[in-house]
Amino acid sequence: MRSWLPVLRDRRRYIAFELEAEDRVGRSELVGEIRAAQASLLGDDGAAKNRLRVVSFDGRFGLIRCSHTRTEECRALLATVHSVGGTRAAMRVRGISGTIKAATEKYIPQSILQPDENKRRVDLGTVSGSVARVIGREIDLCPDDRKMTEGSGTRYVGLTSFDLCGEDIDADGTSDGL
Amino acid sequence: MNFYECNLHALPDGSDSASRLALAAKRLGYSGIVITNHTTTGQPFRYDAAKLVGGIEVVFGIEIVAKDQRSLHARTASLREKADFIAVHGGDEKINRAACEDPNVDLLAHPHDGRSGIGVAAAKAARDNQVAIALDLGPVIRLRGGSRVRWMEVVRRDLNLIEKFDLDLMISTGARSHLDLRSPKDLVALAALLGVERERAVDALALPKSIIYLNRRRWASAGVEIL
């Protein structure tokens, strides 16, 4: 690669993100979805200016590189990602930084709670089903009645441990200590 | 800042319980959420559990679904005393107009869903009655292609009206699940694409809080407060 004078080198920003999804999502699916969202929202011209690349993605956290003047546009286009490969998902921007090192150290947690995937039944009168997974206080429930999630297009019903017992005053609501 | 998400739907209207929405919104940086379930679906499931989520204020409002002007006015009048926040299920041209003409209404939710938007007459009425107009960003997130283009056209036209008449603006997503929620910064960036300035968008996200605090004071009649 040609070397550039330091003043001529294009400046970059690294966006640390978290993907919240209902199921496992691969890197290539995510990249395809981001590209489609970008092309649809900003067109080829905007895409060329953004210079967006997915630097890394581990299934939940990842880094995206973009031009340093276009972080707001990138934020907007990441917000329009609402499903990845047919799975309902949402991208959360955790922070933006100038180097990979800083973005990783500041915004990507090193230890995270793993989802607990043992199957249990929940029956709360109007809402019943089997637990799909539990992360911290958050519970995804696979409902018996499919119609329950019709309006939002999700697969699972989102509950918390507050709904199940409801007698926990100390809880501050953070799910995995991030 | 005190950002509030002003138009959320919890179980059985959406697919998340109120406490799950509160947890998700808190992590995204909101200081409060307003759950406005449609009047057609009834009370949110386990709404008392949402109060246990610390660090975020959960307000229960209501979104009125009415088929004509008369039933809308009757319902807002009867619900005004009970609810902290009254939204109207907009989209239909007549309902949009009727909501703007009703001083009991706090928010006209998603007026652009039916691609009709508000008109000049309704905008004037909204200014006189202090009805806030929602910029519902759900369609930008959900739609693609031609339908989003048409939606954006209507919204841009209405944003001009809102600017011209200096109407109150609120920004929401109309989320039915935690996956529909977006952080305040994301919403500001999305609104910027539609031509809403940064300061304006920030004010719009903070507006619900002041409206709710006004509503919670006890008013004997217009301008007369019981202390």
Image (tube, coloured by chain):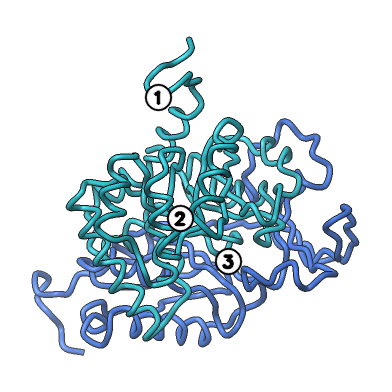
- Labelled disc at residue B222: 1
Say whether residue A77 is left or right of residue B70.
left
Residue beneath the point at 48% across and 29% down: B215
Q: Say which colour chain A has.
A: blue
Instruction: Label the cyan chain with its letter.
Output: B
> Which of marks 1 and 2 precedes in the sequence?
2
Q: Amino acid at mark 2?
A: Ala
Between B51 and B10, which is closer to the camera in this rendering? B10
Task: For residue B57, say whether it is visible.
Answer: no
Residue beneath the point at 43% across and 47% down: B107
- Labelled disc at residue B109: 2
Where is A99 relative to A30, above or below? above
Local secondary structure at mark 1 = loop
Measured in 3D between alpha carbons, the distance from the residue under mark 2 to the one under mark 1, in whole angstroms, is 24 Å
Q: Residues within 10 Å of mark 1 (few under 14, many from 20)?
A: few
Local secondary structure at mark 2 = strand
Q: Which residue is mark 3?
A: A20
Quadrant of the rendered image containing residue A47? bottom left
